[in-house]
Amino acid sequence: MQRWKLTLEYDGRPFVGWQRQDNGPSVQQTLEEAIERLSGETVRVHTSGRTDAGVHALGQVCHFDLEKPFTGLKLRDALNFHLRPAPVAVLLAEAVPEDFHARMTCLGRSYVFRIINRRAPLALETGRAWHVMRPLDAEAMHAAAQVLVGRHDFTSFRAALCQANSPVKTLERLAVERVGDEVRVHAAARSFLHHQVRNMVGTLELVGAGKWSADDLRRALEARNRSAAGPTAPPDGLYFVGARY
C-alpha cells in the first residue's frame, strides 16, 4: 500500500464544492471516481482544505492510499486522462510516507481573491473573478487589512454554519495589491473559518470604495458579531493557492 500526495488545479464552477454531496458533482467525487476507473480500487481522498461551490484551486493538496503500483509521472498522466472532461488537473503526484496527512499535518494554507475593478463587463473572466465596477483604493484596503492580521476572535467574519470549535484564528498575512484592473487580496493562515476570506474581502471592498475606514473595520472585528461586518464576497474570485507542510 502506497500513500500518494496530489497537487491539483481546478475550476470550481461546475462543482458543489470539494466535499461529496447529494446535490451535485464535487471535486472529491470526481477524483475518487477517476482513481477507481484507473486502478479498480475504491479509495477515499483527504484534502488540505475543503472549498465551497464555485471556489477554484491553483494548488490544492490531497492524499489517498493505493495498492496498485505506479510511478508519480504515470499516476499523474493516467489520472489526468481519466479526469477528462472535468476541469480538474493533477499537477504533481508524489509518493509520501504513511504518516503524511493532507489536512492533519498541514502547517498553513494560502488563498488569493481576484477582483476585476473596471466599468466594462467581463468577457473572459466571468465566474473566475469578482467584477466590481466602482473604483477601489487598493492602498486603503491594504492599510485597513492589517487590522485583521494576528490572533483574533473572527466571529464577525465567520459563516453562520461554520463548524469550527473556536472563532479564534491567527491570520498570518492579509495583503492587497493592484495589478492593472485587477485587485488581489492575499490571505495566509494555519487554518480559516468557513467563509472567512470571502467575508473579509467583502468588508475590505467597502473600505476600497470609501464607504468604510480602518477604524470601522476594527470596530467590526471587535464587535464579534457577523452582522457588524460587510457582505460575503462571491465565490468566483477565490482561489486556494497552496498548502504548507
Image (cartoon, rainbow, N blue to C red):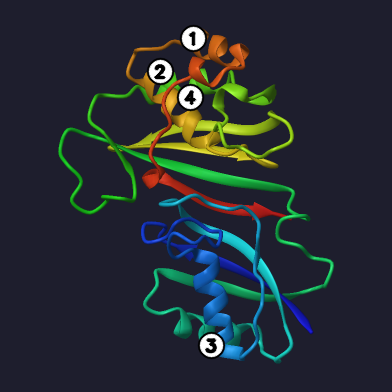
Q: Which of the 4 quarters of the picture holds residue 103?
A: bottom right
Quadrant of the frame with the C terminus: bottom right
Query: Mark 4 — residue?
Result: 142
Query: Mark 1 — residue?
Result: 216
Circle 1 SS class? helix
Comes first in the chain, label 1 or label 3: 3
Discs 1, 2 touching: Cβ within 8 Å: yes
Residue 11 x, y percent position in the rendering: 40, 60
Circle 4 SS class? helix
Residue 182 x, y percent position in the rendering: 33, 39
Quadrant of the frame with the N terminus: bottom right
Q: Distance between the residues labelled 4 and 1?
A: 14 Å
Amino acid type of the residue that numbered disc 4 sits on in the rendered structure: His
Amino acid type of the residue that numbered disc 2 sits on in the rendered structure: Val
In the rendered view, would you say 185 is above or below 8?
Answer: above
Instruction: Say which residue appears at 32% left-offset and 19% top-offset.
Output: 209
Comes first in the chain, label 4 or label 2: 4
Q: Distance between the residues labelled 1 and 2?
A: 9 Å
Query: Mark 2 — residue?
Result: 207
**Residue 90 appearing in the image:** no
Query: Mark 3 — residue?
Result: 37
Comes first in the chain, label 1 or label 2: 2
Circle 3 SS class? helix
